Image (tube, rainbow, N blue to C red):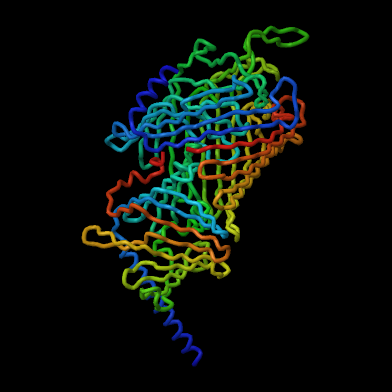
């Protein structure tokens, strides 16, 4: 915190150019009441962004925070971005500092969003990202834009506490990842990657390979346990989040054909350690080598009355390299389809409806439906309301079971500045 | 035989009006060429059918290159879209490329520029109206000559060679300044949808050349009675900008 404060003091002595920010007042009511869990949620969130021209380059800042009135444990403040970007004398670009990367091009499924740890307190289908210390160097070549990455630190994800409905409110007390010596809690870990982006007419693609600690698929459980012949593995010690070193490789691409946009994302994940050593609620498990593929189609049209509609259809499949592994143990969306519609009324208030329907093609009656409506109230204020409904039938503690009976209505007022 | 002669004569007239239309379009193009680079602040006023007004603000910059014009629009107001940037590469002989930077998501999204009819910021201007208007992408047919206000104008019918949300656009071109004074937009059912009137012209001197530009466009939708007004302020032409400032990497 002291480091952040000193940095903030230095930066405030310069003139900032592109400041923008928002403060949101959010309220969520869960339709079904549960004992020992939040039945309503009230929190204030904020985001401040700015940039500054300095030393021939630019500094970018993005601070985010959340103050949770119903549960102080679920509050945080963070520099999501604080980095310097410059172009060298041969026209190549380098960056240094805390950054967030959004590589996915899809609306609902995001296999390509592999960089950055997460705030596991948002929407299950796309948790917000947390900035990570990154050094990058970008080279423009005939092959495309080649980018090299180095991440010297492993940034821990944020977990909400026990009373929270989201992710069943499991907050691990410790975070481990592997090094040669075994499980460690240190932040230092050399992670690196490479990416190539290229546009060929109406087709563009982004290839990437990253050797890093997988921030998106932690396993929550215990690595210390005793075996009881009749009860099985009995965990000992405190609940922890385990992160595995992984080689991730894949692509994200889009192709425009007339009014349609077709999307394809692929991710292959090869973990450094795949032994089953963690006891979870589902038994003993470990990191699984896997592949994810997602396909998408987006179509936009303008109605005679001036309204704009965009229709989304997406599909995602996750496969374990070991065919004995249950696909649904790898991802909530292991064989799912998404149908969505965004309707913009194109009036002065920017009125907009969004509807989305996730449906599991493999698991019986498992779905997630959301409907939102938003509009400006003035040049400064915006209002948003929404409904999320979950359906879950299987009793195997997989898939959407974490959100069973967590249907919610929400309301937010956001002030922009 | 007489029918054949009449048809041939009409065909020759059509070709002649197309040739003349293209020639005028080329002269318009040449008159607006050579601005080098441009920066300006823009206001977009939206007026609904009941007369209620709401304003948007943007900052824009453009650069003129050999095979395309590149433009960045940086949204300033309303505040919920502040920091959103739209980059357009308006190519002379191909479809435009467009990217949108969304600051809250930190995402640069490539937009399908073939979806042309979408409204720009809830206004009566569509992305097609504000995109590249390279003459290579259209046919121009000279329909008549008449007066518009104090100006003598050519009336051209412009039809897109490729996909468009309009069946045709009728353009009134000032003979004196070779600039558009008025445009009438017809939908695919050939019904008049919108009328744009250009005004508040200023002359900008760049070297030995003078470029005549409208400082105001009033777009009225005759079907829903909504209106949008684009106003340019602090416009500077001849500004030296770098092509590197108009790439998707530069959006963030």
Residue B83 or A250: which is nearer the viewer? B83
Residue reaching furthest to the bottom: B2
Residue A412 or B183: which is nearer the viewer? A412
What residue do we see at 59% from left, 41% from top?
A383
Residue A161 or B18: which is nearer the viewer? A161
**Image quadrant where residue A238 sits:** top right
Residue reaching furthest to the left: B208
**Image quadrant where residue A361 sits:** top right
Measuring from the top left, give residue A263's x and y in whole percent. 55, 44
Q: Is residue A143 left or right of residue B238?
A: right
Question: Which quarter of the image is occupied by the C terminus of chain B?
Answer: top left
Measuring from the top left, give residue A342's x and y in whole percent. 61, 47
Residue A347 or B188: which is nearer the viewer? A347
Vertical placement of residue B162 versus B87, above or below: below
Q: Is residue A259 left or right of residue A27?
A: left
Measuring from the top left, give residue A345's x and y in whole percent. 59, 52
Residue A144 appears in view: no
Q: Is residue A193 left or right of residue A220?
A: left
What residue do we see at 78% from left, 9% from top?
A230
Vertical placement of residue B232 versus B183, above or below: above
Residue A414 appears in view: yes
What residue do we see at 72% from left, 34% from top?
A390
What residue do we see at 46% from left, 42% from top?
B82
């Amino acid at each position: 915190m002291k480091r952040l404060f000193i940095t903030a003091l230095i930066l405030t002595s310069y003139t900032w150019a592109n400041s923008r920010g928002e403060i949101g007042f959010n309220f969520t009511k869960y339709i079904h009441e549960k004992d020992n869990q939040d039945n309503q949620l009230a929190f204030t969130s904020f985001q401040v962004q700015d940039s500054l021209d300095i030393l021939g380059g630019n500094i970018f800042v993005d601070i985010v925070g959340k103050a949770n009135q119903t549960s102080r444990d679920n509050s945080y403040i963070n520099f999501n971005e604080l980095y310097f970007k410059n172009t060298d004398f041969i026209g190549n670009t380098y960056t240094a500092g805390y950054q967030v990367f959004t590589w996915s091009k899809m609306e609902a499924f995001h296999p390509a969003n592999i960089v950055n740890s997460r705030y596991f307190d948002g929407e299950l289908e796309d948790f917000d990202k947390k900035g990570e210390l990154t050094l990058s160097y970008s080279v423009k070549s005939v092959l495309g834009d080649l980018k090299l990455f180095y991440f010297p630190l492993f940034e821990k994800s944020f977990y909400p506490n026990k009373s929270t409905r989201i992710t069943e409110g499991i907050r691990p007390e410790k975070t481990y990842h592997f090094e040669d010596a075994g499980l460690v809690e240190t932040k230092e870990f050399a992670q690196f990657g490479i990416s190539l982006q290229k546009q060929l007419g109406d087709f563009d693609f982004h290839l990437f390979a990253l050797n890093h600690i997988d921030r998106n698929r932690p396993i929550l459980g215990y690595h210390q346990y005793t075996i009881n012949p009749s009860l099985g593995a009995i965990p000992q010690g405190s609940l922890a989040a385990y992160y595995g070193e992984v080689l991730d490789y894949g692509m994200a691409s889009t192709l425009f054909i007339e009014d349609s946009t077709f999307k394809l994302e692929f991710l292959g994940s090869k973990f450094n350690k795949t032994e089953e050593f963690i006891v979870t609620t589902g038994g003993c498990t470990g990191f699984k080598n896997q592949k994810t593929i997602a396909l998408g189609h987006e179509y936009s049209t303008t109605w005679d009355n001036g309204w704009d509609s965009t229709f989304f259809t997406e599909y995602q499949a996750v496969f374990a390299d070991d065919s004995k592994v249950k696909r649904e143990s790898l991802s909530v969306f292991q064989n799912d389809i998404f149908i969505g519609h965004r309707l913009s009324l194109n009036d002065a208030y920017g009125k907009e409806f969004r509807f989305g329907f996730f449906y599991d093609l493999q698991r019986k009656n498992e779905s997630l439906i959301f409907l939102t409506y938003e509009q400006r109230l003035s040049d400064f204020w915006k209002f948003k309301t929404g409904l999320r409904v979950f359906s879950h039938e299987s009793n195997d503690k997989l898939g959407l079971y974490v959100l069973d009976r967590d249907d919610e209505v929400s309301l937010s007022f956001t002030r922009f500045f | 035989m007489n029918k054949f002669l009449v048809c041939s004569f009409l065909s020759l007239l059509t070709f002649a009006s197309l040739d003349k239309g293209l020639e005028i379009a080329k002269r318009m193009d040449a008159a607006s060429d050579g601005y080098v680079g441009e920066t300006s602040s823009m206001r977009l006023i939206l007026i609904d059918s009941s007369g209620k007004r709401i304003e948007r603000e943007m900052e824009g910059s453009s650069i003129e290159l050999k095979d395309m014009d590149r433009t960045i629009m940086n949204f300033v107001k309303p505040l919920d879209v502040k920091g959103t940037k739209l980059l357009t590469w308006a190519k002379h002989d191909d479809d435009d490329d467009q990217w949108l930077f969304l600051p809250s998501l930190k995402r640069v999204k490539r937009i399908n520029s073939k979806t042309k009819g979408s409204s720009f910021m809830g206004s009566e201007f569509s992305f097609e109206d504000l995109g590249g208007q390279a003459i290579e992408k259209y046919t121009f047919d000279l329909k008549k000559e008449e007066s518009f206000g104090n100006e003598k104008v050519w009336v051209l019918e412009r039809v897109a060679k490729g996909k468009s949300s309009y069946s045709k656009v009728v353009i009134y071109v000032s003979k004196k300044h070779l600039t558009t004074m008025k445009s009438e937009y017809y939908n695919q059912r050939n019904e008049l949808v919108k009328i744009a009137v250009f005004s508040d012209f200023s002359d900008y001197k760049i070297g030995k050349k003078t470029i005549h530009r409208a400082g105001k466009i009033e777009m009225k939708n005759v079907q829903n009675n909504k209106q949008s007004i684009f106003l340019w302020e602090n416009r500077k032409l001849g500004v030296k900008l770098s092509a590197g400032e108009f790439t998707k990497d530069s959006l963030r």
